[in-house]
C-alpha cells in the first residue's frame, strides 16, 4: 500500500494487523521531520519523496511477498503415514496434491501454449512483448530458464499456487508439468553422480558486469 503521511497516521492503527497487507510505503512531498511514530509499525518499509524510488523497490517487494507466502506441510518420514498424520495436514495441501496428479497426468500440446498466451493477453496487457516471445520460443527444456527469468511468469505461477486460482493453474498446467519433469531429471542425474546420500541445491541468477 502506498499512502501519504497524513493518511498513514490515521489508518495504520486500523489496518496494520490485516494479514493481506504486506507492506506500507509512505509518499510525501518533503522528508518527515519526526519519524519516531513510524517505528512502531514494522510493515512500513520506507518513506519516499519521489514516486520513482517507490517503483524501484516494488518489484523486489512483490517477489519477496510471493516467496514468503508459499505454504509448506510436513510429514515425519520416520513414522508410518497414518490417518492421524494425514488429518493434521492442511486441507489446502491435500487439494493441491490431487490437483498436481491431474496436471502431471494430462497430455499437453502446442495448443496448450496458445491457450495460455491467449489467457495472458486478456489479463496482462503490459507484458505483450514477453507473452509473444514466450509463444514463439518456449520449449519444455527452457522451463527453468523462463521460471527464473525476471518476467511475469514467476509471479503469476507463485500467486496462482498460493491463492489456488484454478483457472490460472490449469492454463499453466503444461508449464508446471515441464518444470517438474525437468527438475526431476536434473535431480536424478546429479543425485546418481553424488556419493553423498543428500546434496544441496541453490537457486541463483547470473549478473552481467554492468549489473
Image (cartoon, rainbow, N blue to C red):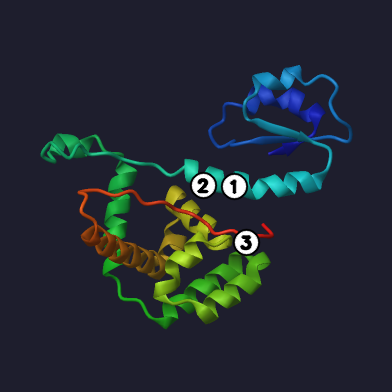
**For residue 95, above or below residue 8:** below
Q: Residue furthest right?
A: 30
Label number found at residue 208:
3
Query: Horizontally, is 166 left or right of 84 in the view?
Result: right
Contact (Cβ within 8 Å) of mark 2 with mark 1: yes
Q: Which is more foreground, mark 1 or mark 3?
A: 3
The residue nearer to you, when weighing 111 against 153, is 153
Q: How crowded is mark 2: few (under 14 residues within 10 Å), some or many (20 or more)?
A: some
**For residue 23, above or below residue 101:** above
Q: Which is more foreground, mark 2 or mark 3?
A: 3
**Residue drawn 47% across the image and 53% down it:** 158
Separation of residues labelled 2 and 1 (CA atoms):
6 Å
Mark positioned earlier in the residue sequence (1 or 3)? 1
Separation of residues labelled 2 and 3 (CA atoms):
25 Å
Separation of residues labelled 1 and 3 (CA atoms):
23 Å
**Residue drawn 43% across the image and 53% down it:** 161
**Where is mark 1, residue-wise?**
62
Q: What element carries label 1?
A: helix
Quadrant into which the N terminus falls: top right
Q: Where is residue 91 in the image (x, y as percent from the top left)?
A: 30, 42
Q: Can residue 171 be seen in this view?
A: no
Amino acid at each position: 500500500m502506498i499512502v501519504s503521511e497524513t493518511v498513514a497516521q490515521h489508518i495504520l492503527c486500523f489496518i496494520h494487523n490485516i494479514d493481506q497487507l504486506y507492506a506500507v510505503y509512505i509518499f510525501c512531498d518533503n522528508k518527515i521531520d519526526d519519524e519516531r511514530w513510524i517505528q512502531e509499525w514494522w510493515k512500513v518499509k520506507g518513506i519516499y519523496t519521489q514516486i520513482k524510488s517507490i517503483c524501484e523497490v516494488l518489484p523486489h517487494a512483490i517477489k519477496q511477498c510471493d516467496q514468503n507466502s508459499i505454504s509448506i506441510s510436513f510429514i515425519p518420514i520416520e513414522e508410518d503415514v497414518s490417518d492421524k498424520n494425514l488429518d493434521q495436514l492442511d486441507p489446502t495441501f491435500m487439494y493441491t496434491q490431487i490437483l498436481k496428479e491431474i496436471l502431471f497426468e494430462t497430455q499437453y500440446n502446442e495448443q496448450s501454449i496458445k491457450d495460455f498466451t491467449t489467457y495472458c493477453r486478456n489479463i496482462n496487457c503490459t507484458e505483450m512483448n514477453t507473452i509473444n516471445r514466450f509463444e514463439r520460443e518456449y520449449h519444455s527444456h527452457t522451463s527453468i530458464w523462463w521460471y527464473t527469468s525476471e518476467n511475469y511468469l514467476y509471479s503469476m505461477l507463485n500467486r496462482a499456487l498460493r491463492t489456488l486460482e484454478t483457472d490460472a493453474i490449469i492454463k499453466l498446467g503444461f508449464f508446471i508439468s515441464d518444470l517438474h519433469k525437468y527438475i526431476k531429471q536434473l535431480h536424478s542425474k546429479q543425485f546418481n553422480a553424488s556419493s553423498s546420500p543428500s546434496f544441496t541445491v541453490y537457486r541463483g541468477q547470473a549478473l552481467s558486469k554492468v549489473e
